[in-house]
Amino acid sequence: MIDTKTEVAKRLSALIGLDVSWVSHAGDMLTMQFGPQRKYILQGKTREDGAWALHVQCDWKLEQDNRTVATRENLRGSDEKARDTTKCLHEVLLLKGPVMVERVSADTTGGVVLSFSQGFRLGVVPDGVKDDEDWRFFAPGLNAAHLVIEGGAVAPESFD
């Protein structure tokens, strides 16, 4: 049996010491990249992404010094609202100086907390809905298994 807490903490420990290098969204999914940007080819097209990516499709909250900066709800609604939220996140995490991952903690239900420099903290809380992806962590452009949390547990394809 997979120990979700241990597996998540082990995999996400790769982020410690890396800066947030990009923030975006796809619908109400938060997408974050970490580490230096690198170029690679995907389906015949040149792309540039960070060394690691985190895609969050469940509840999340970004705080700075215990004040809420944004939540999943801020990406829901109009496209304009989502764009404004992404612009705000990009501004506070990238343009106001580097924000580095300092600590990672996980729980038994696939929840994770990333503690950053400058007092930032991202909390991710899986929905726990069976067969529904909560979040994934991967190295863009590399042919390696993604860590997928689905229904509050590590999905089997995380080890392919």
Image (tube, rainbow, N blue to C red):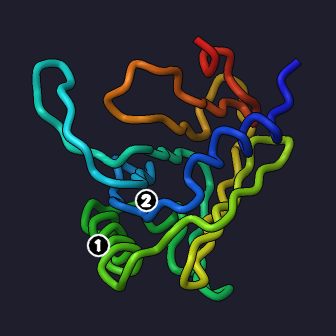
- Mark 1 nearby-residue class (10 Å; few <14, some 14–19, many ≥20): some
Q: Of the numbered discs in the image, which one, if any, rests on residue 76? A: 2
How far is disc 2 from disc 1 in space, using C-alphas?
15 Å
> Where 112 sits versus 83, above or below?
above
Q: Nearer the viewer, mark 2 or mark 1?
A: 1
Do the residues bearing badges 2 and 1 touch, measured as CB atoms within 8 Å? no
User: Where is mark 1, residue-wise?
Assistant: 87
For the point 50% across and 69% down, which residue is it?
100
Indicate the quadrant where residue 16 lies: bottom right
Tag 2: residue type? Arg
Q: Quadrant of residue 45?
A: top left
Which quadrant does the N terminus fall into?
A: top right
Position of the C terminus by quadrant: top right
Q: Residue at x 82, y 41 (%)?
A: 5
Instruction: Using the image, determine if residue 127 lies above or below residue 63.
Output: above
Q: Position of residue 2 (x, y in %)?
A: 83, 23
In the rendered structure, the answer to whether residue 35 lies left or right of residue 116 reads: left
Crowdedness near tag 2: few (<14), some (14–19) or many (≥20) residues, C-alpha within 10 Å: some
Which of these two is toward me, 5 or 142? 142
Tell me residue 65's x, y (percent). Answer: 64, 88
Q: Residue at x 41, y 51 (%)?
A: 31
Residue 148: x %, y % from top left: 60, 30
Q: What x and y, as percent, mark residue 88?
A: 35, 77
Q: Nearer the viewer, residue 26 or 48?
A: 48
Is disc 2 placed on a helix, strand or loop? loop
Q: Which residue reaches farthest top?
A: 160
Local secondary structure at mark 1 = helix
User: Which amino acid type is shown beneath numbered disc 1?
Assistant: Lys
Q: Is residue 101 above or below residue 160?
A: below
* Vertical arrangement, residue 21 with respect to residue 88, above or below: above
